[in-house]
Amino acid sequence: MQDAPKKQLTLFDSTCLIVGIIIGAGIYQVAPTVAQGTSHWWGFLGIWAIGGLLSLCGAIGYAELATAYPQEGGDYVYLSRAYGRWAGFLFGWIQLVVVRPGDIVGMAFIFATYARTLWDFMPSATLSYQFVPWGVYADAAVPWSQLIYAALAVAVLTAVNVIGVPQGKWTQNVLTTVKAIGLLAIVAVAVAAPGGSLAGPSAGKVPLSLALILVLFTFGGWNEMAYVAAEVKDPRRNIVRALVLGTVAVTVLYLMVNGAFLYALGFSGLTGSEAVATDTVSTVLPQFGGRLISVLVCISALGATNGLIFTGARISYAVGAEHRAFRPLGLWNPRTGTPARALILQGVIAVALIVLLGSFVNAILYTAAVVYSFYLATTLAVIVLRWKEPGVERPYRVTGYPLPPIVFCLVCGFLIYSAVAYKPQIAAAAFGILLAGLPLYWLTRRQAAA
């Protein structure tokens, strides 16, 4: 009987998981704003290359941790060993109620937004919002079709992952392959365009710090490999390979796609575009460009959603396996070979947040304040665990140690400061939810000891 994780993920599966999660739909939304934060075309491409290098600094730190501790749960395992069980519990708690459902919902809303452009089956029906919890105001009226599309995406993909790991991983592989081909198709179409001018300053300046934040947001997801480390075949080699290959592949794709945007629209045209991918394809295919891009964005968003669902449930499973309060989540279903209960609860919370939050922006605001705090703590764990557990075998050690972890810690600190400065009330609310996990941890610890 299968009552524990089984090694079923090949190097290709693992790389597709990383690439599929990183390449959501952010690349189609943030490019013009990033361009407005730079003064020249070479600065625009340069900041994307820097984003890839900074992400790689974080990824190789996670590679050392994942190969030294190849268990389900990723950050939960590393934080527990580095700082104590309370730190791992808080990570699992905030992932369960804030970060992972919010990330899933954000991608589901992007899918829903573009799905409506293909077929809006309830064009005039809306749900009115006035206020949602934690001080986040929603849109005045959200189309019901958007909410239904988002909820269906979460429900269907959750069901696929509950059925079994092969179904979940092959869904991920197909979606990732299609979205990568789609991005390469944009590049190919752009090459056929007449070409725009690369000269001229940015049309509307935004802070360079905001541009970097947006770039790093689009690279988010490289750490997901750590959550499924126990399911990777030959983890000593394939975890490192998948993290590095996935991050490098995304960096190359992003540079190619943004180069295509520049070539087709020119620098001024890029900075002023409201739908950069659509505008790029429409220069060559004016009649079909919009719908083709909508299909591609839908596939990209679904690929990211599926990857987040697949890996997120492994965090809840790891917490449930060790903490009494979440014990039902720590059971591996022997029939399906998946953490079915963790998947179902994660899906229920995500669907509830779709109704409560109502939009992509609110979903991002729900998660932003605490994400980089845990990135920072986990990256520091590379240094802490080398000192605390020097006898543990480390099949991979960070190249250039300790410079990459230090660089990435500084980046995390900058992003935490920026998030708090931008929306202090929402940041305070998110940290309040995080701290609410401490009494729950102490209570369950006392019950276990009684």
Image (spheres, rainbow, N blue to C red):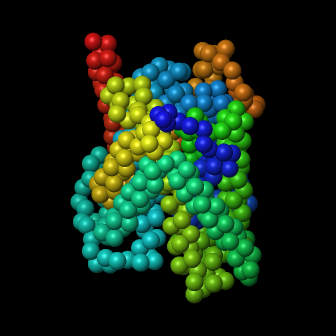
> At 69% from the left edge and 36% from the top edge, which residue is drawn?
234
Observer-nearest residue: 14 or 159? 159
> At 56% from the left edge and 69% from the top edge, which residue is drawn?
296
Picture coordinates of residue 378, whole percent (x, y): 55, 30
Report which quarter residue 425 is drawn in.
top left
* Quadrant for the C terminus in the image: top left
Residue lying at the far top of the rendered structure: 450
Picture coordinates of residue 400, whole percent (x, y): 76, 31
Residue lying at the far front of the rendered structure: 1
In the image, is residue 5 above or below residue 418? Answer: above
Can see residue 227? Answer: yes
> At 62% from the left edge and 44% from the top edge, which residue is drawn?
9
In the image, is residue 419 above or below residue 176? Answer: above
Residue lying at the far bottom of the rendered structure: 287
Can see residue 26? Answer: no
Observer-nearest residue: 396 or 142? 396
> At 59% from the left edge and 50% from the top edge, which residue is drawn?
17
